[in-house]
Image: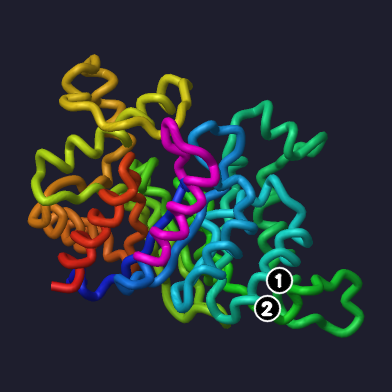
Amino acid sequence: MKSLQDTALSMLDLVSVREGGTVADALAISLRTAQHAEALGFTRYWLAEHHNMPGIASSATAVLVGHIAGGTQRIRVGSGGIMLPNHAPLVVAEAFGTLAALYPDRIDLGLGRAPGTDPATMRALRRDRVETEEDFPRDVAELQRLLAPAQPGQSIVAMPGAGSNVPIWLLGSSLFSAQLAAQRGLPYAFASHFAPRMLMPALEVYRSTFRPSATLAKPYVVIGVPLLAAPTDEEAQFLASSTYQRVLGILRNERSRLQPPVANFLAQLHPQEQAAIDGFLGAAVIGGPEAVRKGLTALVQATGADELMLVCDTFDPAMRLRSLDIAAAQWRH
């Protein structure tokens, strides 16, 4: 059975804009967090594409990947993910080909098939494009071709991009991307940090139907894990109330900036709202060092994940770094 120490640790950053703070503050906090994660030995640091959300500043994802990679030395930096329906594959290939030239062997290209936003913003991003189920597999295949070495007579060549072989990951919260990742022999990241319900079925589909490829000989699984660690369980729950408020805002369609923690926040909610937050954060690990060790170990043993992608936000950025310190200490020992 796989142990926590056999599993890589990484981080996904939403680049949260805090109440009373600015986008510039959020970007500076993100870079400091990436530098801290690198010092702790994390494998990669990913940034998520979202649009038209007042509390998230990661919409220009490729720009942020370059910013974080430029401020770190070794850690892999990438997208978790680029929402492919919003972009032409050639544009993505050129952007990430440029990043790969600037930061060799450090760039990841995670791809999702959701728009990462609301319908009105989706229309603003896509203009008149109508997405079909066949588009995502076709666009993934086109990206693979554009990032591979150019072939004789190839009419469209990504420059930069051709021959960069930027690693492509497929992201998902259902069975669709799990099946596609298995068919293409690509690594797979499941979005259990916000949609844990289909985690186990998706991993079963991915592993059972996986076909080895030139880039990956056997399945490789990353799972998203909401994390909040503190010296005590009680303090961790208090700090996590900022995340609870964010989730409640998503459920109510009342999005806002990241809010300060509130004591006994969950107890003030209707039982149905409490249950909805619990479902959203079903894979969360929240507590003191012992609870964090047990929670992360249980996830690894239940899923056999090769890598845990931590999603950690606190209103006070120093508490975020401390949370990563506690998780890393349990991971090492």
Whether 305 is drawn above or below 25: the answer is: below
Q: What span is in magenta?
A: 16-36
Quadrant of the image containing the C terminus: bottom left
Residue name at image x 33 percent, y 72 percent? 39
Asked if one can make out residue 248 in the rendered structure from this viewpoint, the answer is yes
Q: Secondary structure at mark 1?
A: helix
Quadrant of the image containing the N terminus: bottom left
- Tell me if 39 is positioned left or right of 6 in this view: right
33 falls in the magenta region: yes
Whether 150 is drawn above or below 19: the answer is: below
Q: Secondary structure at mark 2?
A: helix
* Residue position marked by numbered label 1 in the rendering: 98
Q: Specify the principal SS of the magenta part.
A: helix
* Residue position marked by numbered label 2 in the rendering: 101
- Whether the residues at callouts 2 and 1 have beta carbons within 8 Å, the answer is yes
Q: Amino acid at mark 2?
A: Ala
